[in-house]
Image (spheres, rainbow, N blue to C red):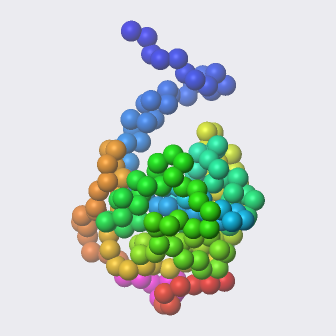
């Protein structure tokens, strides 16, 4: 039995995407909702490919399917917010992972949100959030990488981060106690605005 054909002839030495999919399933990732507002419309999408990219300047990055309407809306508006979900918000994650469910006029009637600095919606009661000005946009194969410069950020109520692993949601089990915040590096106020 021969291996499936590689879909990208420009990279004949690359491993087949199915191998990457299987390997990536073993990587635990956080779960967040990415949002933006463009005109009267709001957009939201569940994402798991986000990271804090830099501390100086502060930058976060998130990868979104290239053809998602959210990408165009974020480009047009120049703003985005990332709300990191906590255990207990699985239904919210599923809601915005459903194709077509992440677009509304005005606001999402069934999801409590608020605005901070940019006007992009921040999910209420999330674990932590970043409200950003769009810093740059990069190509990433079948995804687009949005890089945001946080204008405000804060941790929400206490709780455990919602994790995605092996195709399902999980709660972490701490193996060591959390390290204390470093006052010389971390803000003491609940939110930081620049």
From the image, which quarter does the N terminus lie in? top left
**Percent position (x, y) of residue 154?**
50, 79
Q: Provide the major secondary structure of the magenta segment.
A: loop
In this rendering, the answer to whether 87 lies above or below 182 is above
Q: Quadrant of the C terminus?
A: bottom right
Q: Nearer the viewer, residue 15 or 95?
A: 95
Q: Is residue 177 visible?
A: yes
Q: Quadrant of residue 148?
A: bottom right
Percent x, y of residue 31: 43, 58
Q: Nearer the viewer, residue 109 or 68?
A: 109
Residue at x-position 63% and y-position 54%: 70
As for residue 181 lying within the magenta part, the answer is yes
Q: Is residue 68 left or right of residue 110?
A: right
Picture quadrant of residue 146: bottom right
Picture coordinates of residue 149 (x, y %)?
A: 66, 70
Q: In the image, what residue occupies the spot 43% across and 79% down? A: 156
Magenta-colored stretch includes residue 182: yes
How many numbered dots are placed on residues in this image? 0
Q: Is residue 54 visible?
A: no
Residue lying at the far right in this picture: please name it. Answer: 76
Taking the image as shown, residue 161 lies to the left or right of residue 98, namely: left
**Residue 158 image offset from top left, x and y in percent:** 34, 79
141 relative to 85, above or below: above
Residue at 41 percent of width and 61 percent of height: 92
Q: Which residues are magenta?
A: 180-187
Residue in view at x 49 percent, y 31 percent: 17
């Amino acid at each position: 039995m021969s291996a499936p054909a590689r879909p990208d002839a420009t990279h004949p030495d690359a491993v087949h995407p199915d191998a990457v999919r299987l390997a990536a399933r073993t990587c635990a990732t956080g779960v967040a909702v990415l949002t933006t507002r463009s005109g009267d419309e709001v957009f939201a999408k569940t994402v798991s490919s986000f990271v804090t990219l830099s501390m100086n300047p502060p930058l976060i990055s998130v990868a979104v399917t290239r053809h998602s309407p959210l990408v165009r809306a974020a480009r047009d508006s120049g703003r985005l917010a990332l709300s990191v979900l906590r255990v207990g918000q699985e239904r919210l994650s599923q809601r915005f992972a459903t194709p077509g469910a992440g677009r509304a006029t005005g606001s999402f009637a069934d999801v409590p949100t608020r605005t901070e600095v940019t006007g992009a919606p921040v999910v209420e009661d999330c674990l932590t959030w970043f409200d950003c000005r769009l810093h740059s946009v990069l190509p990433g194969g079948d995804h687009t990488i949005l890089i945001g410069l946080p204008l405000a950020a804060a941790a929400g109520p206490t709780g455990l981060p919602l994790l995605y692993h092996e195709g399902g949601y999980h709660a972490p089990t701490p193996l060591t106690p959390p390290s204390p915040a470093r006052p010389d590096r971390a803000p003491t106020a609940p939110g930081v605005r620049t």
